[in-house]
Image: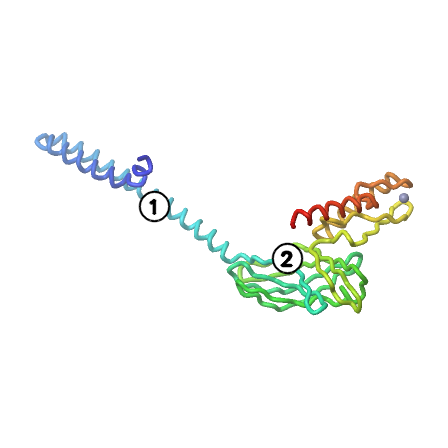
Amino acid sequence: MKKFVSDHTPAIVVPILILTGSLLFNHYWSDPSKTQALGGYLSFVAAAILIWVTWEYVRINQQTLSLQKAQWEQQNKVVLRFGVRRSHGKAQLWIANIGTADFLISEMRVRVRAEKPIVRNERRVVRAGTRTFLSLPETLWDREHLISTFDVRLRYESQQDSGVSQARGFTLLVGNASQVIKVTRGIDDSALWLVNCPKCRDLAPMVVDELANLDEAAERQKIMESELTVSCPQHHSQWMDSVEQLRNRRATHEHDSAKED
Ligand SMILES: [Zn+2]
């Protein structure tokens, strides 16, 4: 009822006013001074309604405009996903465009721990709704034995939007003859991450599970270094990897995979 009234206010108010006006006019038409006052009053009411209707119209138009703008921005936003897959014994980057705007990948930045990042200029257009593949630097698995960890960041450009993606970490398991055997997302807990005690330079392994990229790893390393400094020479840290912790993690992993089955 309330909604009906608010939706149809002009359609209700205007006929009521016309009706009231005609009734009053019919009643007082014989008295010229009263009809004049009535006429003045009614034109004031008409002007007020006109202003109100105009204001409503402007308000609704503005709402529509901001809605259209939001829609337009949404449509032109770059929405990309990427990952690493194994292909013919090598690792390869896949990039998916799940938005509605085409975009260009203009740069790929690969970081390996404690090394200068490898920056490659790219000129790859990814059309909306498609996926493309880029080769990764072969040094990621050529020189490494067993485990290789790195993260990737992509620079993208479209007509309306440009920026840099978040860094995503990956771990490669490398076998004989530099063959990539397995790819996992994030920094795998089989990776050995040694941290120096800043005070005595002793080495201690860091827990690396659930790290999404090298920035997160660097942050954790900083915490561990300060904890090692404080506790030197005993060396205690919440992030120090130990045999028990490793065993615990293996147990939870097995537990998780048992649940999946
Ligand atoms: Zn120390």
Q: Residues within 10 Å of mark 2 (few under 14, many from 20)?
A: some
Question: Based on the displayed image, in which of its 4 quarters is residue 223 positioned?
Answer: top right
Residue 4 screen position, x and y as percent: 30, 38
Q: Which amino acid does label 1 sit on?
A: Tyr
Q: What residue type is labelled 2?
A: Val
Quadrant assignment for the N terminus: top left
Is 115 placed above or below 208 here?
below
Side (left or right) of 101 relative to 117: left
> Which residue occupies the foreground of this view, 46 or 12?
12
State how far apart marks 1 and 2 are (Cα): 42 Å
Label 2: element kind: strand
Is 85 placed above or below 256 here?
below
Report the disc number at residue 57: 1
Side (left or right) of 205 relative to 259: right
In the image, the residue with mark 2 has its CB under 8 Å from the nearest atom of ligand 1: no
**Which residue is disc 2 drawn over?**
164
Residue furthest toward the left? Answer: 30
Label 1: element kind: helix
Mark toward the viewer: 1 or 2 = 2
> Which residue occupies the foreground of this view, 90 or 164?
90
